[in-house]
């Protein structure tokens, strides 16, 4: 709960800051600088030491370079906080009243041309209002007054009151005037100052008072020599004009000064500045704040805390579950290694489809590299009961060690991700070798190799069924689940469907039917559980496939395979022509032909429609080693009869039961299609 309190405190703090920022925006802009000492510089937005600076208690708007070039310069400075000029919602514009003292002192050129007596100096200073506190535009010296330059003139939302000491335009009355400029340095209204007793470039202080009436949309400009203050100063404004600043400027504006020099230079100083504006009544904002923002914040606090609480609870549960799963796995001897998800992601390029090796019933397999070793990373599909399957898979494989089984290198269980890591099989899966289609680049397997593969798979299955402490059913034996190592030894893989089965044969976990069409024993569809005999049947189909190098069945329609390989091989057996099942290219010796017949008969025995007639994997192994003959198989492929009878003359029992009516056999015509 500590964390939660911290979280809610943070949210409260955020609310307070939000409130504060809203209320500060609603307040008026007001300041008073009787002088500009350097410590106040940071309260302004400026262009640094090469721009406007504070020097000798004044703003040196154009650079006051120590003995350096002062010609063709411009500078600009803004007060740090914006003025809220107008409000759309309440349709009001702020009124403001600002006073400042200018001092403009002509500077003789350091070198070059002397001032001709019909020229004065340049260029002037301006009070500016703009939506952006932009730095000074390049090349805004001379008559641009630092307001705009050739590129930005007419394109910048800037309004200025200029105090011009060097007019350039023909309409500029004289070199001592005041004007109002909109989006440029060109005045829309201007008045000469001399008639008002003001000489801007006299080097003496000039006082200015600007008053803007936000209701009447009226601007009044008063200019007078500071020495006249209180006495000779004009009682009437020099400029009084109707101007709607709310139409010309954005809602929020910065206020400041700009100035420039040209071919002839002057010092452009602002000695003092005061500003005050009316408050734009934003009660609406405050109400909006109280009515919406606060409830919203409270809602967020509630939602976040609920989500957080749930997440924590789930994480705790997950932790317990995870550690239980871990214990289950780690408790087994020679446990596979636990990996971190991020390491496996890195190993597989974040499960990049480029690294995909194949897709199994339970997930996608990717090639990866961990600790400089190639591995096959199987990312399990996240089904509802994926965790149980995961436990089953890791447990069963972790405990199994056989030279013909794919070894489990490690596993990972993080959140909903269930991943297993197998050793990498460089030669891929068996189906690619035997179902080559027309790909002649893949060499055919020699008979010895085929026999070795069949024997290897048989050993692995015998180990699973009879060799380990708990019987394991594979449940999905097929060519694509048999991997080939670097020496083409078969390795049985994909234990995704494996279930621990008690040695007494009773199923331990649920065993819903699973498998691949073409490999499934006929009874699979009638009994809802996996059996040893079903594994044997699938092995029989696989044996015929490997021996004949052909697919188990032809797909008749979607998910419907005729067990053609079993039918056709059995038909050859009926005709005593089993050897014809093998391709002529195989070039078999007489001994090998005998072996071929033996293996094919074994395969057919495993595919007997009656599960009770199928040999055990132990018997299969003995036959393959040449220690026993293949079990006898009928010349004709028997019908599939259910329930299957124990192996005593099947036909007699069938007739008897039909006669007594005790049994209602379901027969499937699985031969002679
Ligand atoms: C100021 O200008 C000088 C010379 O033009 C230059 O070397 C220096 O880097 C500039 N300083 C800044 C902060 O722009
Ligand atoms: C000032 O700029 C003008 C052109 O705008 C140029 O002709 C003049 O030489 C420049 N003077 C100095 C001192 O840079
Ligand atoms: C805002 O108020 C002015 C008068 O002060 C009026 O002329 C104008 O039409 C109003 N604008 C809007 C959008 O209400
Ligand atoms: C503006 O300020 C000046 C002094 O700075 C003051 O005399 C004048 O009354 C003010 N005008 C308004 C409308 O506030
Ligand atoms: C400056 O004065 C001289 C002579 O007095 C005149 O020829 C010249 O045109 C004047 N220049 C300007 C820009 O007025
Ligand atoms: C005007 O100023 C802008 C911004 O500093 C700059 O990008 C542009 O090049 C300038 N125009 C000229 C003609 O110098
Ligand atoms: C000043 O005026 C001259 C001629 O009237 C013109 O060529 C020049 O562009 C003007 N300078 C500025 C910065 O507008
Ligand atoms: C303004 O003052 C300057 C400097 O003292 C002087 O040269 C100039 O003639 C004066 N102008 C007027 C119009 O009095
Ligand atoms: C007021 O102005 C007149 C002429 O403009 C001048 O003679 C007089 O000395 C001034 N008075 C003061 C107190 O500055
Ligand atoms: C400004 O507008 C008012 C009406 O709002 C009008 O009486 C006055 O003459 C106008 N002033 C100018 C200089 O246009």
Image (tube, rainbow, N blue to C red):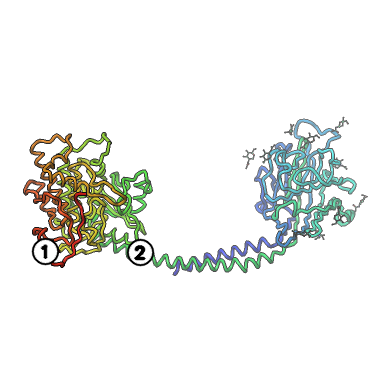
Q: Is mark 1 within 8 Å of ligand 3?
A: no
Question: Counting other residues with Cα less than 10 Å from the Cα at mark 2, is it few (<14), some (14-19), or many (20 or more)?
Answer: some
| Quadrant in the picture for the N terminus | bottom left
Label 1: how many Cα within 10 Å (few below 14, some 14–19, many 20+): few
Write down the quadrant of residue 274 in the picture: bottom right
Q: Which residue is mark 1?
A: 656
State ligand 10's quadrant: bottom right
Q: Secondary structure at mark 2?
A: helix
Foreground tag (1 vs 2): 1
N-terminal of the pair, mark 1 or mark 2, is: 2
In the image, 287 versus 122, the foreground residue is 287
Tell me what residue is drawn at x 19 percent, y 38 percent: 445
Q: Are marks 1 and 2 in contact (CB under 8 Å)?
A: no
| Image coordinates for residue 40, horizontal then vertical, percent | 67, 53
Q: Residue at x 16, y 46 (%)?
A: 571
Query: Residue 581 has which mark?
Result: none
* Image position, residue 104 (x, y; %): 79, 45
Residue furthest to the front? 659
Name the foreground residue: 537 vs 5: 537
Does residue 335 appear anywhere in the picture?
yes
Please identify the residue farthest to the top as the structure is shown.
Answer: 112
- As helix, strand or loop, the secondary structure at mark 1 comes to helix
As rendered, which of 574 and 126 lies closer to the eye? 574
Position of 448 with respect to 481 (left or right) is left
User: Residue 458: image x %, image y %?
Assistant: 15, 49
Compared to 390, does 540 lie above or below? above
Give the CA separation, mark 1 to mark 2.
Answer: 59 Å
The residue wearing badge 2 is 318
Q: Would residue 334 be seen by someone viewing this image from the given angle?
A: no
**How many numbered marks appear?**
2
What residue do we see at 72% from left, 58% from top? 86
- Coordinates of residue 448 in the picture (x, y in percent): 14, 39
């Amino acid at each position: 709960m500590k964390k939660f309190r911290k979280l809610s405190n943070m949210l409260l703090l955020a609310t307070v800051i939000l409130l504060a920022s809203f209320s500060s925006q609603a307040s008026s802009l007001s300041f008073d600088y009787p002088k500009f000492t350097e410590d106040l510089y940071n309260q302004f937005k400026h262009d640094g030491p090469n721009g406007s600076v504070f020097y000798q208690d004044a703003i040196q708007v154009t650079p006051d370079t120590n003995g350096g070039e002062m010609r063709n310069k411009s500078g600009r400075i803004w007060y740090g906080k914006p003025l809220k000029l107008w409000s759309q919602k309440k349709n009001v514009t702020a009124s403001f009243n600002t006073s400042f003292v200018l001092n403009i002192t002509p500077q003789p050129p350091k070198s070059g041309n002397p001032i001709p007596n019909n020229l004065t100096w340049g260029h002037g200073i301006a009070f500016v209002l703009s939506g952006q506190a932009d730095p000074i535009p390049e090349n805004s010296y001379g008559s641009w007054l630092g307001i705009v330059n050739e590129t930005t003139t007419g394109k910048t939302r800037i309004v200025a009151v200029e105090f011009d000491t060097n007019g350039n335009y023909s309409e500029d009355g004289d070199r001592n005037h005041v004007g109002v400029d909109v989006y440029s340095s060109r005045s829309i209204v201007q008045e000469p100052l001399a008639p008002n007793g003001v000489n801007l470039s006299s080097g003496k202080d000039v006082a200015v008072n600007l008053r803007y009436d936000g209701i009447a949309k009226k601007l009044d400009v008063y200019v007078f020599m500071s020495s006249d203050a209180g006495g000779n100063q004009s009682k009437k404004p020099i400029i009084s004009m109707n101007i709607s600043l709310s139409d010309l400027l954005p809602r929020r504006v910065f206020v400041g000064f700009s100035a420039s020099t040209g071919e002839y230079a002057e010092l452009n100083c602002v000695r003092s500045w005061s500003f005050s504006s009316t408050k734009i009544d934003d009660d609406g904002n405050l109400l909006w704040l109280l009515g919406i923002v606060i409830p919203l914040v409270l809602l967020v606090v509630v939602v976040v805390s609920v989500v957080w609480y749930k997440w924590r609870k789930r994480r705790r549960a997950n932790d317990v579950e995870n550690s239980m799963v871990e214990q289950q796995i780690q408790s087994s001897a020679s446990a596979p290694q636990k990996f971190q998800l991020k390491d496996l992601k890195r190993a597989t390029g974040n499960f990049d489809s480029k690294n995909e090796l194949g897709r199994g019933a339970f997930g996608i397999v990717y090639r990866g590299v961990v600790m400089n070793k190639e591995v096959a990373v199987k990312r399990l599909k996240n089904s509802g009961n994926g965790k149980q399957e995961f436990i089953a898979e890791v447990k069963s494989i972790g405990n199994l060690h056989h030279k013909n089984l794919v070894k489990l290198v490690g596993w990972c269980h993080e959140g909903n991700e269930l991943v297993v890591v197998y050793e990498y099989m460089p030669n891929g899966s068996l189906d690619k070798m035997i179902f080559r289609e027309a790909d002649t680049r893949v060499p055919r397997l020699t008979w010895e190799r085929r026999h070795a593969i069949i024997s290897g798979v048989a050993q692995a299955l015998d180990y699973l069924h009879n060799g380990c402490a708990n019987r394991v059913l594979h449940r999905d034996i097929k060519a694509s689940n048999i991997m080939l190592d670097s020496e083409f030894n078969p390795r049985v893989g994909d234990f995704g469907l494996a279930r621990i089965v008690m040695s007494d044969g009773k199923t331990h976990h649920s065993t819903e039917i699973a498998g691949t069409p073409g490999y499934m024993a006929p009874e699979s569809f009638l009994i809802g559980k996996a059996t040893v005999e079903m594994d044997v049947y699938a092995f029989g189909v696989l044996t015929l496939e490997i021996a004949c190098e052909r697919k188990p069945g032809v797909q008749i329609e979607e998910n419907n395979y005729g067990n053609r390989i079993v039918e056709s091989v059995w038909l050859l057996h009926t005709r005593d022509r089993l050897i014809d099942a093998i391709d002529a290219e195989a070039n078999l010796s007489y001994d090998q032909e005998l072996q071929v017949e033996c293996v094919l008969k074994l395969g057919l025995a495993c595919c007997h429609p009656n599960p009770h007639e199928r040999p055990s994997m132990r018997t299969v192994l003995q036959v393959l080693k040449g220690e026993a003959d293949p079990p006898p198989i009928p010349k004709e492929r028997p019908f599939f009869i259910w329930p299957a009878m124990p192996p005593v003359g099947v036909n007699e029992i069938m007739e008897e039961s039909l006669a007594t009516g005790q049994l209602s056999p379901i027969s499937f015509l699985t031969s002679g299609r």
